[in-house]
Amino acid sequence: MATSSERSPPPFPDSEDQDVLDAEEVRGRDSDEDEDLFGSTSTSPVTEMDTTPTSDVSMKPPSDIMNDPLIEPMSSQTGNKPASEPSDDFFDLTNNVSVVAAAATKSDDFVDILGSETGAQRGEVVKADVTVEATIDRSEVTAGVIDPLSQQEAKQTSTAPVIDLSGDSQPVTSKIADPLVALFSDAPPAAEAKKPSSANVDLFDDEEGSDIFAEPLQTKPAKQPQKSLFGEPDEDVFGEPLGAISKKPVPKELKEKSVTTKVTAGGPLQDSKPADIFSQAAASTPSVTSTVNPKTNGVHSEEDGDIFAAEATVELSLDSPRNERKKEATAKPSAPAPTSLPAAASLAKPQPPALEELEEEEEEEEEDKFDIFVSVKDPEKIGDGMNAYMAYKVSTQTTLPMFRNKTFTVRRRFSDFLGLYEKLSEKHGPNGFIVPPPPEKSLLGMTKVKVGKEDSSSTDFVERRRGALERYLQRVVNHPSLLQDPDVREFLEREELPRAVSTQALSGAGFLKMINKATDAVSKMTIKMNESDVWFEEKLQEVESADQQFRKLHALVESLVVHRKELSLNTASFAKSAAMLGSAEDNTALSRALSQLAEVEDKMEQLHQEQAASDTFTFAEMIADYIRLLGAVRGSFDHRMKAWQRWQDAQSMLQKKRETEAKLLWANKPDKLQLAKEEIAEWEAKVTQYERDFERVSATVRKEVIRFEREKTKNCKRQVITYLECLLQSQQQLIKYWEAFLPEAKAIA
Amino acid sequence: MMEEVKETASVLSVHDDSIKVTEVLKEGDTLTFIIVSQKLSGTGEYHVDRTYEDFEWLQQHLFSQGDVPGIQGVIFPPLPAKPQVNASPRSIKQLGFLALGECQPYCKALETFLQQVAAHSILSKNKAVEVFLTSSDPPGRQKVKKNIFNRLSQAVEEMRKEGHKDVDEFFQNERDHNLILTGCTKTAAEKFLDVVATEQKIAVACGHFSTALHLCVEPGEDPDKQAFSRVCVKLSEVFESIKKNMTSVAENNVNTLGLGLDLESRYQEAEREMLFRRTCKLVELENAQRNVEKAKPVKKAAMEEVKKAAETEFEHTSGVAKQEIARFQGARVEMLQQALVGWCEKQLLTAKESADQFNQHLEVFRGMA
């Protein structure tokens, strides 16, 4: 933060003067700005950002505003490392703040450097307001936007936008405003809480920034501090930026009061920066969504919340792994501005498409959280005899900047998939991550493929496996932390992969055995472990029962599929015998009707077959996936147990060491006493470390399980919809067949 | 098979198409069928209860009307096989479609049998029919003797005489054709039965799945859990409708085309029996002719007499058979058409209803966002 404290003062004096200037500028630009905002954010932000910012900073602050908040999460996402824990949430948040603050200074810096006289900070503050305002009451642009801006009174700006939001009569905005109004009531205390802290004038310190954040967090979302990451992020997210908006005036006020102490006033401004960033984030998101909503009749007020929640989750959850992000954050401000700007622009790229997708995919909500889609295609048998293996084409489509290309394809064999899983589970399993498991190696199925000719069971097997591999990979890349793993990237991108070895252990029964072993270990350890956390106890039981239920469901679906296939076979043979009957029939009309019937039945056989496939691939496979995933969930519980065990072991070891110390003290052996003391210190450190490890793993497991359950529901729903669509379609097809046949039957007489 | 001249109907005191088998009562191992028919003389109904033995009694009486010329040429309406209360797999196989469901298909088949008998120009004249339909006393409780129409004895003879060359090209053709059709119809009916059986299995499997889904519902206030539970419950409802759909599809199959194919197959059998009886007569006649040729002058006259008798009987039989075949061909086409149209209409209705339901489910799921 040294950099930020050094760098932040310079822009400040400008900004004082800039206030008026800015206001005028904004007013003058007003109409342009609106169009700019709407145009650039919703339609073609990428190109604009890419091309113009360096040259034309003063004219393009909106796009900068758009960029900055978006860049932060994105950049931190690229430097992601799996090390997040709710217990550290506040640490994280403080860290975020510091980083964010750093980023803010950074953005200010380059604005400074380039635009020289654009009152970056104040400008941003004001413009953030403008974006909120302008987007929300488009129709009242002249009245709503200009008034509060021209008056420039801190209090008024703070209240005006909010009042406008809540008091707006437009149907669309009123929906959006609802949560805002609710949250607004929370905001003032936050602002008040902030006042004293900023009055402290302890301003250059990082802790100041963290204080600011810690306070609103504690005052508002303290109700569910644990859930704040996943549970009700919308409230928080709204709360924060709104709090931030209402906070903004405070530093301004302060500033006006203490114009003389410019340096100290720089502090509050510095404080306000994190707030800025968040307010910008909030302002920019609404600006997109609210422009979207009028078009789509703005029906889903809840969905707005969802979208924000999604955004927020992304931001927050990605922020939590700190190490690399810190480095980047600190590295960036020091980097020359011109280079960081294009980089920022390019980083921001994936976001606008994502936002555009949000417009279209009302149902699929967070689908585009990670803009990456993996498909596994063209299974191909390579080689002959028992040495043959299947190779698959793995195609990736992405707009994520971490990949060099937008689309790329590699060939991978089955054992490569297993190898990837091994690497991932080795690396991430102990941290409590649920690593999606690949389909098991099937000796029987594969032997059939190897030996057998093209019969239906082996093609069915290959198709099932292909689908399973595809879903497995998609799950891996959908996981925010796993996606960052270099092995995943290598797997998706690299032409040649070193041959995966020792995947044999995962073959068929071995894999199941492993899962069972894990279960046994868990259950054994549960007895030993006096569970301190009821949540985990309950969850473990839930997982166990869910596992059993899924197994039962799977058996049922499989039998259903068997019957469906039987029906298709029987229908086919009935069609054949109907055709025979038709040909044996003397009566021409009846004969024709019967052969028509045979045709209808043939078509129905096709339908039944499709239905069987649909049953298989939407339900049977999905359930099989979840049985595997539940195994992985239990694995993560297991890893938590292990962490606990290690902690306990260390504790008992420490106990022993202390006893030895006592004995030595008793025996009066000072020479050995020193050694014992050192050992105790060492073990004490270990105990604390293991305890922290355990807590970290617990937190990760908890987060992962919640994520897993949410994904499960969403996935199930999506599958059911697909299934129903398919069912409906086949029913409609059936209606068509019958309708075509009816006149034939009537024509017999 | 009832577009015969209505003058004969006066023999019976009931409307032939008003005969209904309304109910079946189970007493131990015996099934008793309640038969209701409307009086010709105006209002009022006959209610009689008959066991399967009574039906057999009726059929035997129909078979053994020695005084009617050409009775052997009649295609007797086929009586379905004896129903079993605790059916063994073999008897189920023999009954085919009629073993499905709760006796409704079987009652329907009996009803058709009675209607066919009552509508038949020759058979309805038999007193036994009137007695069977109207007398309150059960007629056939005493043991009936099996006569020559016993199926078992037929089977043996069949082997010898089935292939006998016919003198009449029409009958030869009819026999050949009947042979093919009998086989085809039987296979078609069996295959169709398989289809229905599988559909019923699917319905049951869907039911199980639906029930199992209900068990997935997790208690708790957690919104995530509740969302998942909602999905499960809805999906369970979806499978419940799939089950209903399958059940009604299977039912439609049984009640229309299934019964039609079954009746058709049994009628083909009946025709075959009739043709066989005629062939027997033919063989008899040819034997008599040979005997006349070979006979010593003393016995010639007697032989001539026998031959004459056989000839008249054969001619009567052939005459009636020709009529019967013509009638049968028309009737079976009509019957099959009705079955097909009814089938098609019912399936169409079911498909539309199901499509509606699925659509509703789909909407619900889409709205669950």
Image (spheres, coloured by chain):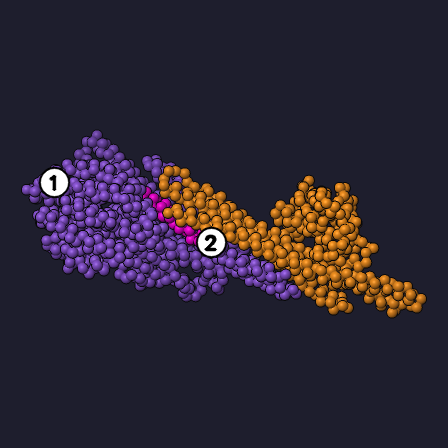
Chain colours: A purple, B orange
Q: Spatial distance from mark 1 to mark 2, Cα to Cα?
A: 65 Å
Quadrant where the image shows the C terminus of chain A: bottom right
Tag 1's secondary structure? helix
Disc 1 marks which amino acid? Leu
| Snapshot quadrant of residue A489 | bottom left
Magenta span contains residue A723: yes
Residue matched to label 1: A254
Residue matched to label 2: A728
Asked whether, in this view, residue B171 is left or right of residue A283, the answer is: right
Asked whether, in this view, residue A402 is left or right of residue B32, the answer is: left
- Rendered residue at 21%/53% (across/down): A34
Can you give x and y, in whole percent of width and height, for residue B286 in the image?
82, 66
Q: Chain of mark 2?
A: A
Magenta span contains residue A438: no
Instruction: Please check whether the numbered discs 1 and 2 fall on a single chain.
Output: yes
Can you give x and y, in whole percent of width and height, for residue A678 in the image?
19, 39
Can you give x and y, in whole percent of width and height, for residue A351 in the image?
26, 54
For the residue pair A382 and A50, the one nearer the viewer reads as A50
| Numbered range of the magenta stretch | A701-727
Mark before the other along the chain sequence, 1 or 2: 1
- Rendered residue at 52%/50% (across/down): B245
Asked whether, in this view, residue A3 is left or right of residue A727, the answer is: left
Q: Chain of mark 1?
A: A
* Residue A406 position (above or below residue B367): below
For the residue pair B22 and A403, the one nearer the viewer reads as B22
Q: Residues within 10 Å of mark 2 (few under 14, many from 20)?
A: many
